[in-house]
Amino acid sequence: MTINEKLNKILAFLVEHKDAFVNVNVIHKVVFQQTIPVDEAARLLSKIIKDGHVEAFEENTSVRYILETEMFLEGGGYGGIYKKVTEANSEGLNGNHQVIKADELSIVIPKVFASYAWGDLVHERKVMELVETLRKNGLDAQMDKMLSQQQTAINFKEMMVKGMQYDKVLVFLSPKYKDKADAFTGGVGTEFRIVINDMEKNPKKYILVSFDGRGNDLVPLALQGYDVVNLSSDGWWDVLIRKLTDQEQYVFSPVTGKPPVLPVHRVDALPIEKNAEEAIAIETTNIRQGNSSSSGGLYNFVEFDVQASFKNISGQSIKGFGYEIKIRKELMPELYNLPNVDGYLVIKKSVDNKLFNNQSVESDFMKIKIMSQHLPRIIGTNLTITVHSEFGSYAKEFPVNTLFATYRNAMNFGEKYPLGTPHMFQ
């Protein structure tokens, strides 16, 4: 069928049902019996509204017949010759099912079978009354007591199997039904086997109903968690009819356009607590031997340039840190007269810039001078570097003896020896 023929078919439906409000759902399910997808039904409806041969309602979600609709069709419509619905097509039959032409859409009347447990006369009476109510309201509901009257020697097992093949099956829950279903005994057991094997394949066919709520004493174990229509609650009639006739309560628009693109907000990881030693590594990366003075092959003094290095090993950025260098005042004669603590100078510095993970930063060079007359107060001491950061404080000691190892003679070649080695200084 071409697009124009589909458009004509929708308009012909409107002419045939002049009081009906036709929306996407009606076009999809009734006009085309679900032979076209919902999005195509939406496009056809939009085209009809745009061309103005109908009256649009509810923000262009449904349309209704106007005189222009029929005049347009009789003039040729969207192409081809418009023919009114023939008597053969309006007899109200669709296959083996009756069709009701309601004000707003056509409803296929299903055959409904009632499955219930015998043994409780009050319960059985209620089942009969509901079947009768459905029949008086246009639904072809049937049950065993009705069918058994049509034959003198009915085969109940065959009747049950046939009943379970109806379009819809009402499963009336009760304590007796639960007991027999859980034990798979009697006629209920036979029907229940069919129900649980067929429910996944036909999920809209079986409707669980109850006159006494939704208690676990009513629902068989295999049906726990399924929806139950409570026939004692308010609004039960509308709920039941919608399930029996597959009428939707809400009709949503087809998906159109693209979803909105929203900004992305990145989430910072929680800081991992580390001790100070695990945050910043302290090293003396650059020690250079400088000028020296000697006589008779023994040193009078030796000079060094020393630079400390700090590396961020915390796994995250550090917002700067401070550090202190503690050293015997005799090793820095230029600062000898500055205030000291027990003969040690304490030099304080800070790094104000952010230090990224695995990034290193160096201190300024310090001038060290080892003089022979000061050796007794130098040997055996340490150069101590302390770091103060957001992770706490951490100190590392560097023995002066090995830190300032030097050549054994003033020729500056050969093996280096620790301070205090005999026959190196005057």
Image (cartoon, rainbow, N blue to C red):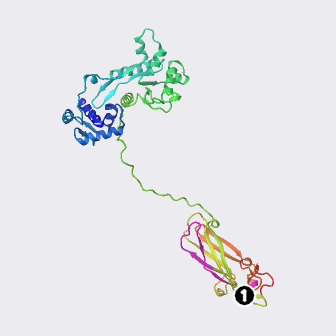
Give the class, few, some or many, for how many residues have Cα within 10 Å of label 1's Cα (few <14, many ≥20): some
SS type, badge 1 = strand
Q: Left of 320 or right of it: where is 413?
A: right
Nearer to us in this view, 337 or 365: 365
Q: In which quarter of the image is residue 348?
A: bottom right
Q: In this view, does 309 lie above or below 126?
A: below
Quadrant of the image containing the N terminus:
top left
Q: For the magenta stretch, what is the residue range?
A: 347-376
Residue 337 visible within the image: no
79 or 102: which is nearer to us?
Answer: 79
| The one of 312 and 397 positioned closer to us in this rendering | 312
Q: Hey, which quadrant is residue 128 in on the image?
A: top left
Q: In this view, does 123 lie above or below 230?
A: above
Q: Residue at x 61, y 63 (%)?
A: 274
Amino acid carrying label 1: it is: Phe
Residue 79 lies in quadrant:
top left
Which residue is situated farthest in the top direction here? 152
Q: In this view, does 251 lie to the left or right of 306?
A: left
Residue 348 among magenta residues:
yes
Against 419, is 183 above or below?
Answer: above
> Where residue 125 sits: x, y (%)?
41, 18
> Which residue matches tag 1?
301
Furthest toward the bottom, the residue is 295
